[in-house]
Amino acid sequence: MAAVTSLGLGRTMEKKLHAVGIHSAEELAEIGSRQAVFRLKEQYPNTCVVILYHLEAAIRGVEIKQLGDSCKAELKAYFKQL
């Protein structure tokens, strides 16, 4: 199993993901960015939409700026309902 940091996420995010039960890059990819940010928001209420963008980009193996506008709009709409 690959470390979460292998996706380009930092140690702080890795620790937060571990705290919500996500311990590897494979687990993150399996549950997806939306479920991951849902868990993070429950434990860390100050989690922002940019974290969702970073998680989605990491799972896709791209830079955040490579996420399309429609993708970001969908993610933002999801985040607003949390």
Image (tube, helix red, strand yellow):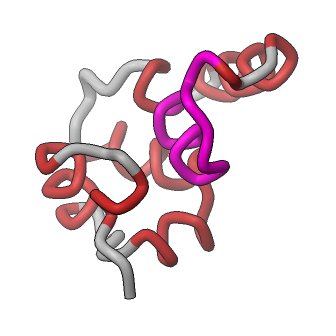
Furthest residue to the right?
A: 70
Q: Position of residue 38 (x, y in %)?
A: 48, 45
Residue 80 counted in the magenta span: no
The residue closer to the viewer here, 22 or 79, is: 22
Furthest residue to the bottom?
A: 1
Q: Position of residue 1 (x, y in %)?
A: 38, 88
Q: Residue at x 37, y 79 (%)?
A: 2
In which quadrant of the rendered image does the C terminus lie?
A: top right
The answer to whether residue 62 is above or below residue 76 is below
Q: In the drawing, does residue 50 fall left or right of residue 33?
A: left
Q: Position of residue 71 (x, y in %)?
A: 80, 25
Q: Which residues are magenta?
A: 52-65
Quarter of the image holding residue 53? top right
The residue closer to the viewer here, 34 or 50, is: 50
Residue 61 counted in the magenta span: yes
Q: Residue at x 62, y 73 (%)?
A: 30
Q: In the drawing, does residue 78 fall left or right of residue 38?
A: right
Q: Residue at x 13, y 50 (%)?
A: 11
Q: In the drawing, does residue 20 fall left or right of residue 1?
A: left
The answer to whether residue 26 is above or below residue 76 is below
Q: Main secondary structure of the magenta part?
A: helix
Q: In the drawing, does residue 35 fall left or right of residue 70?
A: left
The answer to whether residue 67 is above or below residue 39 is above
Q: Residue at x 32, y 27 (%)?
A: 47
